[in-house]
Amino acid sequence: RIMRPDDANIAGNVHGGIILKMIEEAGAIISTRHCNSQGGEPCVAALARVERTDFLSPMCIGEVANVSAEITYTSRHSVEVQVNVLSENILTGAKKVTNKATLWYVPLSLKNVNKVVEVPPMQYARKEQEDEGKKRYEEQKLDRLETKQKNGDLIFPVINPEPHTVGYSQSSLIHLVGPSDCTLLGFVHGGVTMKLMDEVAGIVAARHCKTNIVTASVDAINFHEKIKKGSVITISGRMTFTSNKSMEIEVFVDADPFVNESRERYRAVSAFFTYVSLSKEGKALPVPQLLTETEDEKRRFEEGKGRYLQTKAKRQAQMQQQA
Amino acid sequence: RIMRPDDANIAGNVHGGIILKMIEEAGAIISTRHCNSQGGEPCVAALARVERTDFLSPMCIGEVANVSAEITYTSRHSVEVQVNVLSENILTGAKKVTNKATLWYVPLSLKNVNKVVEVPPMQYARKEQEDEGKKRYEEQKLDRLETKQKNGDLIFPVINPEPHTVGYSQSSLIHLVGPSDCTLLGFVHGGVTMKLMDEVAGIVAARHCKTNIVTASVDAINFHEKIKKGSVITISGRMTFTSNKSMEIEVFVDADPFVNESRERYRAVSAFFTYVSLSKEGKALPVPQLLTETEDEKRRFEEGKGRYLQTKAKRQAQMQQQA
Amino acid sequence: RIMRPDDANIAGNVHGGIILKMIEEAGAIISTRHCNSQGGEPCVAALARVERTDFLSPMCIGEVANVSAEITYTSRHSVEVQVNVLSENILTGAKKVTNKATLWYVPLSLKNVNKVVEVPPMQYARKEQEDEGKKRYEEQKLDRLETKQKNGDLIFPVINPEPHTVGYSQSSLIHLVGPSDCTLLGFVHGGVTMKLMDEVAGIVAARHCKTNIVTASVDAINFHEKIKKGSVITISGRMTFTSNKSMEIEVFVDADPFVNESRERYRAVSAFFTYVSLSKEGKALPVPQLLTETEDEKRRFEEGKGRYLQTKAKRQAQMQQQA
């Protein structure tokens, strides 16, 4: 579809969240289709996990997004989908890869939302595709088990914060979950959640550096908890780390199923987003250093630095492989 | 994309206007791409005409719309696009054809919106494709020249109308044209206009028969006049004819570029929509007969009857050909 | 237009904010049209004030909203518009009055946004209409001058609040102002602001009473400050008063034009919303009493009680007049 002014920031760069939402919709369609293809129990695929995603180049207003999705692995109860996004300037015909994302879906029964149904096995062109898929499956499973939602970790406002401290840019947003946000099962689409998370992260980044910013990458996100229609969700973001030209923001999603009192507010998702600040020519600008004050802030900064250095090392290793 | 609750009426049938908007977006993308493919003056394709379109089967919430578009003819200054819409139930895998539409686009220069640029000629697989396309081109050209916008024909409210008279169901809607409604040139997308027209026509039909209604077809629409961002558009609809099981509604679009005084309010588009009333099982229900009162209403009823009989005769001829 | 699922809460009642937005759009159109009707300097009408508005009956999904607007008074630099909203059930034909609102607009020059242009005088059918309008004009002018934005008055979160305290239900929301939120002048539509205010107030009310709630009324709102495209706005709400069957919520809107650093965050609007809790049959339910803790909370509760009693007295006086 064509990118519209409402999809973009003032400089005309499309919000990463809009792209994440399109990716997730494509993934949900193809995996729901696959899981119902053998005539078993009717089911809807629910997003369980998104692998780390890099935004390779910004998309602009007026460009057309071409989204293609392919199933790349199936385990007994989950489906791996690879989604590619190409942006096309229909005036010049120029195309470029914007995103490559890997998503994991789990099929939930239409009759009993708590029942995971069996996934029909896919056919592999080569045996090694299956082996590589299985390896990715085991890795993500391990990572999902390791990740526990930090339920106790809340974000509290700071009164009269100094510029460039954590409290200065932290932000939160509430959203009432409406029918259009939900799947047939009445739970929020993972893509809708990711779009809101990117919105908050973007506001945190812009408050920090006061320039135009774009999403550079999103770390792997695990969706442990479903969010029901009618819930109020609070999305909160705080900056954790800055390098010379990038900012890392941690985002929490808390759900409050407040009309139905049987359940307390709970942490549904959390993730790290990385942003860069762009000049009008599209070059990355230096960003102000984050000022850490408390022990927790310093610890989170060091942890963020660790993730940053690890990603950098991985990228250099990949480049050397390609060279 | 997946059809959402907001795309549909209370019975879950997707509004015809949503489908028309998707069709037009696909047509605009493919024709803009084609017109810029030879590296000439950058341009944006503007919708000039939509041929008569039948809605073959209603689409429902949760189904996925597959829209495909193909260029089928090019003249020096216009492009014919054929768009097909398939609806797919991703749970059962069932697919059915929802629409086949033919649209004509004209490429307008990005630098000078009043200049029509030249269209790169397409390659035809067979010579007869070109001949048939040329025939369609000549026919629509004639029809476009014949159509004059009936500027003087306004819809006035009636006080305390009797049930099933024209005044009883007539409706109008005003809309302020915002950025998301517009192309890169700052003019309203044809698809946005058609969506609003269908919305008004649907209200007229529902007021008349008080049941769930769906769009059955739209007569050819000519877009003679562009509508600029910031304009206020008034979309008015009145019933012109009823058969046993269908209702014909005439819809006018008047644009008022009211901030910029250089121009008076003008008629931008007009069209005839046909609706049927559906039972819960999807069967067409009888509709109340339209009561005509004035001479004009009686004349329009007869004209509508003419269109209805002509369409019926055409369809029977097609069926006999296929049999 | 037809009310859609996304316009409503889970019980199917349309959010008051959706209605306020439609009212404001109608007012903006009619007053912009009037101010440009005499061929003076092109201008756009900006919302300056909305008088107290009662929601007489809830509107439901599938109903059609009929919005009509009329200019009722003009001063040299402002326009008074009366907007009526009728809800119509198109299946039964039943209509009822949903709202009557009075709005004041000021025409701003399209060339120089800080210049208020002159309003062409309207023609009155009777002299007393003009006199009554002038009286209303003087009254609202006085009220606007008296109202000062309480800039220092912020809402701070409370850790582990007790149920039914002020801290328990208070909420805030951030919104990045996009192109569709804005007028041709690049400033947020008053209606967009009111819709967001109603959204926050509704969440506060629902958190307090855990049932389905609807907007009952909105006190007069003055729009002292414009909000520019690209700003981040924070909308915060806290409960100030409860009677047996109603809740009063104070809502603040703070704007942060953060990309352009010339200006600090500022208070743009504030207002009081009143909500009631409805049973499935549409009857008002008792609401839990608000627990006040601090001196400020107790003072605000008493002020709210004053407003409540005043409104009640006024309504009784009106009823006696009518009887």
Image (cartoon, coloured by chain):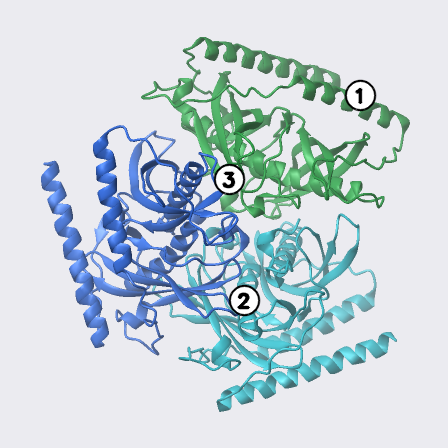
Chain colours: A cyan, B green, C blue
| Residue at screen point 60% across, 88% down | A302
Which subunit holds the residue at mark 3?
A: B
Chain of the residue where label 1 is placed in the rendered structure? B
Label 2 belongs to which residue?
C260
Subunit under mark 2? C
Q: Are marks 1 and 2 on the same chain?
A: no
Quadrant in the picture for residue A248: bottom right
Which of the 4 quarters of the picture holds residue B137?
top right
C-alpha distance separating marks 2 and 3: 28 Å
Task: Establish if A97 lies above or below C111.
Answer: below
Would residue B247 appear left or right of B188 to someone viewing this image? left
Label 3 – label 1 distance at C-alpha: 43 Å
The numbered dot on residue B259 is 3
Which mark sits nearer the N-terminus, 3 or 1?
A: 1
Between residues A141 and B177, which one lies in front from this camera angle?
B177
Is residue B77 visible in the rendered image? The answer is yes
Q: Which residue is mark 1?
A: B135
Q: Amino acid at mark 1?
A: Lys
Q: Position of residue C1 (x, y in %)?
A: 44, 38
**What x and y, as percent, mark residue A236?**
48, 71
